[in-house]
Amino acid sequence: MTLLHNSGFPRIGHKRELKFALERYWRGEDDLKKLEAVAARLRARHWQLQQDAGLDLLPANDFSLYDQILDNSLLLGATPSRFGDLSTLSHADAAFCVARGRDAQGNPVAAAEMTKWFDTNYHFIVPELQRGQTFSVSSNKLFDEVKEARRLGHLNIKPVLPGPLTWLWLSKAEGEAFNRLELLDDLVATYGDILQRLANLGVEWVQLDEPALALDLPTDWKQAYESAYSRLNAAPVKLLLATYFGPLQDNLHLAARLPVDGLHLDAVRAPGELALLADHLPAYKVLSAGIIDGRNIWRADLSQILDLLEPLQKRMGDRLWLAPSCSLLHVPVDLSSETELDTELKGWLAFAVQKLDELNLLRESLQADPGRRQQLLSDNHSAAQARRLSTRIHDPAVQERLGSLNAGMAQRRSHYRERRVQQIELPLFPTTTIGSFPQTAEIRQARRDYRLGRLDNAAYQQQMHSEIHKAVEIQEALGLDVLVHGEAERNDMVEYFGEQLQGFAFTRFGWVQSYGSRCVKPPVLFGDVSRPDPMTLSWTSYAQSLTDKPMKGMLTGPVTLLNWSFVRDDQPRALTCRQLALALRDEVLDLEQAGISIIQIDEAALREGLPLRQADWQEYLHWAVESFRIAASGVQDSTQIHTHMCYSEFNDVMPAIAAMDADVITIETSRSRMELLDAFRDFDYPAEIGPGVYDIHSANIPRQEDMLALLQKALERIPAERLWVNPDCGLKTRDWKEVKPALENMVAAAHRLRRQYQEKDRVSA
Ligand code: GLN
Ligand code: ZN
């Protein structure tokens, strides 16, 4: 019989139990035992769910208290030396030290860098490796979880680990530069030890995740796959090599050839490669078809999938396995929690739990005779049809407006240099923030009360106004140059806009882990997009009315709205993005009309939308940049357009970033100690830059001298008249008692630099 398995289940819990337990622990309200108990309950529930859904192999080690890549670094004993001797701590505490910036003694140190997991919105902790370092099995977490599953009666456990090459590929060299492949021998030996220990626990199958095989790999890395896996082959377990997030393309033959017992392919992103692999896999190998979409929330069209699978199954028989395309970490847990979603829309969706049911139904249908199959699939078939045909997704007015789009609409009136002189005059090294201020308990309470109807419109507005008032007062006292209103009214930078746009729907519990305890609830972008009313105008105008300093308008850009939503799959993403751009363009013009002279359009997610393969970049960047420009370019020259991006590496997309033609760009840089700025120097970026001078993800108060040093470093690369001073990102996750001293130090650093420059000017004059 066709075997069903899964690469990972969302660990956060359908009511975000893990998030709340983590945060209670971090606040010191619970002890580790309590946290571990919540974690164990979640694992038990998730295993049971998967067992009940008919899965034959259940994933283990897909659970993590923080991040699975960090877990793997701890397993291998590969943690940076600045954290001290972490072996004295529990796995959980060691992970929290690295992720949250504490050494083994509890002293603040720089947290490890975090970056996006392939093209998802999940962030992992980047392993840092040093020349000549060695590895050894250094954590029991993996083995404990296997034992725990077996104790619960799940003997069909398949531990899942990041494969050695993907883990190594995602790491970065610290200190002396070196070729990380030098470490491979020892790394593979340690993986050998791990596999041996799993075998000793009675494990039959181990899944090694190698999504790096969906990337453009240099030749030496391809060769490294061959040598690593021919050594791992000796381990006394069966290996399932899992690739996902994209087609294998030039790595297909390599992947097919590696001496493992099975190969998993993302058949949603690479349907065409299924049959190719069936041709090329040696007869002893399993082909696991990742056929249920682990990256989106639409119900699968099972009859369509069956057409693809049937011929394969005829050829391969039981050697064909079925699974979701990738770990279900990237989708919400359970649709049945959604009691407020209208039934039509709900009928179009499938979350993790429902996806497992789809898998089961798929297998049943695959084995059924034609009559029975039709019966089994009738409900699924009509659901898939219903969405495509629904009038709710088509808006003729939006389509007409799209049709009248012309190239001039994506073009500012003048070049940056001509615009600059017409724009607002600011001191040298202007200081600003990225938009949001601490989201206090009162703010969240007010939004909740308003949503539940416990607070009426007037009372809610009054409270938001008083929050804005407070934020303005604080910023004026701090001496910031460009103010923000603080985003108190926004639960989330995407949801806030989605809620006011046509074409979006919202779930109550559709949470997906972003990093650590942080989750996002991506909107469901199901239909044509339009803006019935202004979305930010009244808050921004009110804020501006309180101060003579410039108030920065604050919008989320079209590409970010797209990339952080679950997006309809019935039309190209480029088209959907253009609809978003037109809606935002109207908002930008409304702000300008109301006298807002600086408008920031956040594109935090522009880079993460990049296709995994370089050959596909141009096309994406073309429409993404064009969409930003459609949103931004309606304004007069005198309006200064900012954009903000976090966690971006710019080196390889510099021309596109410059082509966005923003007057000012603020970026994340402090964690990488300004290394990022080389890109801006090498490319000769034409406009102004605010490289973040402190890491808002850490609770540590940045010191004035450190920020000054970073600014000085930035000045080696950016001309003084184009340098802005700001934090790395928005401050909504911080407390005022952290934010005030941090910004005080930041403003002091900027002022000191300003004085140094004025001094220099006097001396040279
Ligand atoms: N303006 C947003 C904020 O300050 C930007 C957040 C982000 O870039 N992720 O919160
Ligand atoms: Zn940011």
Image (spheres, helix red, strand yellow):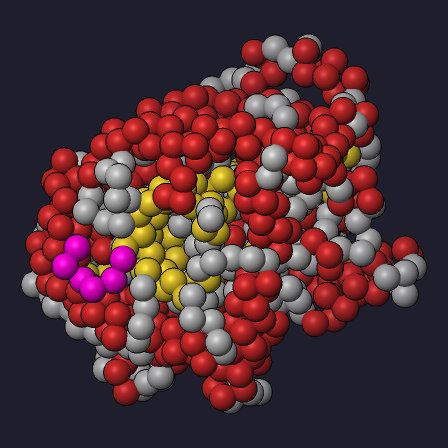
Rendered view: 546 above or below 279? below
Identify the residue at image location x=38%, y=62%. 158
Q: Magenta region: which residues?
A: 233-238
Does residue 504 appear anywhere in the picture? Answer: no
Main SS of residues in magenta: loop
In the figure, is residue 102 to the left or right of 193? right
**Residue 218: quadrant of the picture:** top left
Judging depth in this view, the residue of 357 and 419 nearest the camera is: 357
Total numbered badges shown on the rendered structure:
0
Q: Residue 322: x percent and y percent?
A: 47, 45
Q: Is residue 314 left or right of residue 128?
A: right
User: Is residue 390 left or right of 633 when viewed as pictured?
Assistant: right
| Relative depth, front residue between 621 and 168 | 168
Q: Is residue 727 above or below residue 649?
A: below
Of the 4 image quadrants, the one containing the C terminus is top left
Q: Nearer the viewer, residue 108 or 33?
A: 33
Horizontal arrangement in the rendering, residue 606 relative to residue 676 (left or right): right
Residue 43: percent from left, percent from top:
52, 71
Q: Is residue 234 magenta?
A: yes
Up-down relation of residue 454 to residue 332 (above or below): below
Question: Going 33% across and 32% down the picture, which residue do you hit?
Answer: 278
Spot occupied by residue 410 in the image (x, y as percentages of width and height): 56, 18
Image location of residue 71, percent across then percent down: 34, 68
Compare residues 298 and 708 and report the one nearer the observer: 298
Q: Is residue 387 magenta?
A: no
* Residue 179 shows in the view: yes
Q: Residue at x 46, y 47 (%)?
A: 2
